[in-house]
Image (cartoon, rainbow, N blue to C red):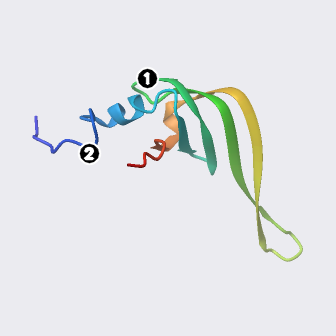
């Protein structure tokens, strides 16, 4: 096994440790299909399947105006009380900002 430098932060030795430290915190999740989530992380597993609560979902939609052939970008927002996120759609997980 290769010797890697430990990740920064208290108690972080592997990438999923950062997710573990974010339990019961609000996180940002970027998904495939131009979807973004912000919500409280209740649970996760090694595949990055997650259960989020009090979720705000933002979807970026690009439509083409057939008359002018211009792209029209709009965002759609919705709120969910609880959401299951399948890990294979996750691109990025950002923990809450921790100010010193």
Judging from the image, what secondary structure is the residue with disc 1 in?
Answer: loop
Task: Pick the quarter of the image with the N terminus.
Answer: top left
Residue at (52, 33) in percent of width and height: 25
Left or right of 5? Residue 44 is right
| In front: label 2 or label 1 | 2
Bin the neighbour count of mark 1 within 10 Å (Cα to Cα): few under 14, some 14-19, many 20 and up.
few
Judging from the image, what secondary structure is the residue with disc 2 in?
Answer: loop
Asked whether 70 or 77 is in front, the reply is: 77
Count of marks placed on residues: 2
Q: Position of residue 64 (x, y in %)?
A: 79, 66
CA gap between label 2 and label 1 equals 22 Å
Q: Earlier in the sequence, mark 2 or mark 1?
A: 2
Q: Position of residue 22 (x, y in %)?
A: 45, 33
Bin the neighbour count of mark 2 within 10 Å (Cα to Cα): few under 14, some 14-19, many 20 and up.
few
Q: Position of residue 67 (x, y in %)?
A: 89, 74
Left or right of 11? Residue 30 is right
Q: Which mark is residue 45?
A: 1
Residue assigned mark 2: 8
Choose top left, top right, bottom left or bottom right for residue 18: top left
Residue at (54, 43) in percent of width and height: 28
**Above-or-below relation of 89 to 35:** above
Asked whether 37 or 63 is in front, the reply is: 37
Asked whether 73 or 18 is in front, the reply is: 18
Asked whether 75 or 39 is in front, the reply is: 39
Q: Position of residue 95 (x, y in %)?
A: 46, 41
Left or right of 9? Residue 97 is right
**Above-or-below relation of 91 to 55:** below
Left or right of 48? Residue 81 is right
Choose top left, top right, bottom left or bottom right for residue 68: bottom right
């Amino acid at each position: 096994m290769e010797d890697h430098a430990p990740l920064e932060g208290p108690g972080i030795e592997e990438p999923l440790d950062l997710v573990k430290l974010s339990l019961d915190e609000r996180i940002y999740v970027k998904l495939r299909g131009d979807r973004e989530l912000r919500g409280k992380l209740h649970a996760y597993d090694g595949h990055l399947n997650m259960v989020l609560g009090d979720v705000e979902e933002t979807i970026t939609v690009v439509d083409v105006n057939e008359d002018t052939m211009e792209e029209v970008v709009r965002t759609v927002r919705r709120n969910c009380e609880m959401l299951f996120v399948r890990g294979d759609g996750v691109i990025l997980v950002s923990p809450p900002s921790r100010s010193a």
